[in-house]
Image (cartoon, coloured by chain):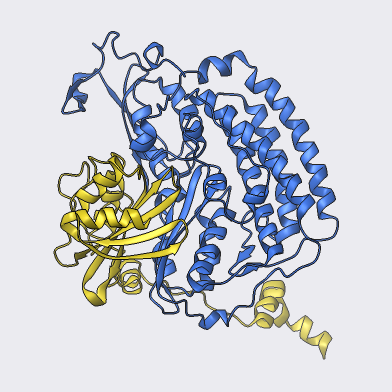
Chain colours: A blue, B yellow
Amino acid sequence: MTDISKSKYRNFDSDRSKYPVMENGKPVIDLDSHRFTKIWQGPQHPGVTGNMSVELIVSGDEIVDAKTHVGYLHRSFEKLMERRKYIQCFPIVCRICVPEPDTNEYCVSAAMEDLAGITVPEKAQWLRTLNLEMSRVGSFLMWLGGQANSLGMGAIGQWTIGMRDFWLDLFEEMTGGRVYHMYMIPGGVRKDLPDGFKGRARKLIIRTRRLLQDVENTFFYNTIIKSRLHDLGIITPDMVDEYGIVGPNARASGKGYDIRINNPYVKYDELDLKMITSTGSDAFARAEVRYRELHQSLDLISQILDRIPEEGNIQAKLPNVLHWKIPAGQTYVKAESTRGEHGFYMVSDGSEYPRRVFARGASYTHAITLLETLAVNISISDLAALMVSLHTCPPEIER
Amino acid sequence: MDQLFNRISRMIKLEGSTKQRDDLYFITVRKEQLELLLSHLKNYEGFTHLAFLQAVDYIENNEFQLTYMLYNYDNRVNLGIKVFIDRDKSEMTSIHKLWPHAWQYQRELHELFGIDFPGSPRVHESFVLEGWEEIPPMRRDFDTKAYTERTFYPRPGRFTKDPKEYMKEKLYGNFAESPEIRKNND
């Protein structure tokens, strides 16, 4: 466990003369005193993840106060879904997260199946598992490039985004779409695997592993990366519940909470899957956890490819979906995205339209409360690395 | 879970409980007893993770339903706690002292549903809608279509042309009407 009192970023006992006076737990900032400067990082800034902005008060180059602002991306998906029939929700929900749309699709289909009492056929469940794991790989590759980019190491970003494109090719074969797939529908999936898909997927896994070896040598054994990520953004174990931290951020602090293991869905209970945790608690530990989970996802994909049944139904029988009335009730369905617990809370009132759909994204707490806390006391040049190491994704905050 | 419900019902009045799945239960409690129940569940029953806090608008009964979704890491069960509050005087006790990150859900509910949480930090700050002057948009009686027509000036739309005439004009211009062309055609 990292000793927080020795951390260079958490050492509050040092010279505090340049920091503002605290009153009722809040800093008193007088901009007219010329001791502090207000800077906006975002919404158009290479150092922020997506369309959000952080309002910073800096003293020299050290951040003394941070506030997250969102709303640049608000499209009100939840309100839109209240005025659409159940099947019309699918083109909307995948837009909630660009790098990883399949988790949304899975959660919405599973919520409808749970409310309507539909059982998904065996083969469709395997295909869903494959789709979810492939989207995790794509998202992790994008994150790995972003983390290296945020520290000024552009080459890794080009490698991993290039490799992600080959995974998008596989998605195109499997679903017909590269970025937004709309693959899962209530009762199953839309398509079966094309001929020769398994062979091409296995080749791509080998290719990705080869690339990851290069990434490991250049990124994880790099002195600069280590010195900048160590001790940055420490999440102590008692912060996990206070701030609602989930996913790799919580697992890097020693909290073993992975929904694929704790509450297994689709076919995860039949796969060989182990919880990956760390006690480093800082940004480097989070990077390591994500890197090991990327390898784990590749391993899971090869397991799934071996076990997908050749024959079988891929879709359960549904009523006419244009006049589909789901019985009244409410449910909460969650899945493990690369950022953590991703869930949908769906309320039906027995009509053809959902009464309320709520998307719970992991970034909701990570990018607002947690980021505002962790950003204080760090250098302004480390903020981009901190944001990427929390893996924040603004679309799931505003929905 | 039955034992848990027994223990809870000895403490407060349970208005109802449903089992949705093996790992998902819902209970309904009264508004005044919510804080007591939540602190008991957090401190003594192991429900330490607050997944979300959201509202559902039941306009026909003139009430909001608030859902507090908790999770227990030990027995791996989600427990949703439902509370009904009056829609006209929509006000609820803040739980930011139990879970510090709850303030942002409460700020969102204040902006999108108009539910007030007195004492919650930054609850009156704007979240995604800056300068919003209408009724809170996630309420069922907010008319999105009327709002759009009122706010955004209706555009006239595209005017259409006959493709044959348009292409003739674009390619030949006035040349097609010239006497030389007409003479050749004759």
* Whole-percent x, y for residue B168 in the image: 70, 78
Instruction: Report the front residue among A396 and B41.
Output: B41
Q: Is residue A45 left or right of residue A106?
A: left
Q: Relative to A188, does residue A276 appear above or below in the rendering? A: above
* Quarter placement of the C terminus of chain B: bottom right
Q: Relative to A324, does residue A205 appear above or below in the rendering? A: above
> At 48% from the left edge and 34% from the top edge, which residue is drawn?
A249
Does residue A342 appear in this view?
yes
* Whole-percent x, y for residue A156 in the image: 66, 29
Does residue B68 appear in this view?
no
- Among the 4 quarters of the image, the one containing residue A15: top left
Instruction: Report the front residue among B181 and A389.
Output: A389
> At 54% from the left edge and 46% from the top edge, which residue is drawn?
A337
Residue farthest along the bottom direction in this orientation: B186
Q: Relative to A32, does residue B40 appear above or below in the rendering? A: below
* Whole-percent x, y for residue B60 in the image: 25, 77
- Among the 4 quarters of the image, the one containing residue A373: top left
Instruction: Report the front residue among B180 and A61.
Output: A61
Q: Is residue A174 left or right of residue B96?
A: right
- Among the 4 quarters of the image, the one containing residue B112: bottom left
* Whole-percent x, y for residue B140 in the image: 30, 71
Q: Relative to A354, does residue A286 appear above or below in the rendering? A: above
Q: Is residue A211 left or right of residue A396?
A: right
> At 25% from the left edge and 41% from the top edge, which residue is drawn?
B98
Q: How many marks?
A: 0
